Amino acid sequence: MLEYVTRAVVLEKSPAGDFDGIVSLYTEDFGRVSAKATSIRKITSKLSAHLEPGNLATVRLVARRSPLISGGLRLVDGLSERKLFSDYLFLDIVSRVTVELHKDEGLWRFLLSGAADRPALFSHLGFGTPDRGCTHCGSESAFFHETDQIFLCALCSFSVPQNFLLHI
């Protein structure tokens, strides 16, 4: 079993079983990683507060069939607490648009800046900026279609499946 210690921005946390959870992280060394955190939903869990979405944490990942988080510390760069983001839609975009285990140093630096600028995120990821308008009609774009990777206005967004739309 290999262990890795890396800094990570917590993107999302979802339940798995009675007490466990799956935590999606964007790590400095590996890119986006989804890892299991055992007993994270117990009231006595020491990891739970450190692995809240938007936090910058130092985590210890254990490589198995699926990664496991065995430790998490919110002590980063001498700070006792570092909440980078409170915009959960921004974190959802990062989680859904990035590829698992694909490291992007530019995106990591962008996330460390703490700027939850959605148009700048799309531009950084190579999708262009939403201000260029809807792909279908040219009016102001309000959504990004995840699978087609296009920008859509509110009216044109009704013609595509709603579960693949990200609000800009």
Image (tube, helix red, strand yellow):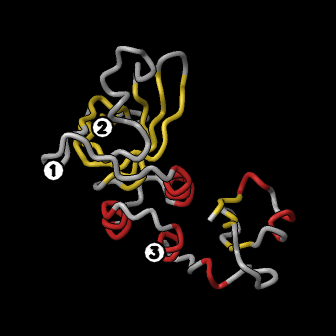
| Residue 13 seen by the camera | yes
Choose between 79 and 65: the one closer to the eye. Answer: 79
Q: Residue at x 53, y 15 (%)?
A: 18
- Sooner in the amino-acid sequence: mark 3 or mark 2: 2
Which label is found at residue 77? 1
Image disc number at residue 4 = none
Three-letter residue code for mark 1: Asp
Mark 1 lies on a secondary structure that is loop
Please tell me which residue is depicted at 34% across the width and 70% down the height of the picture: 106
In the rendered view, would you say 22 is above or below 155? above
Report the amino acid beneath label 3: His
Q: Quadrant of the C terminus?
A: bottom right
Place residue 35 in its image quadrant: top left
Q: Label 2 amino acid?
A: Leu
Q: Quadrant of residue 69?
A: top left
> Dot 2: what SS?
strand
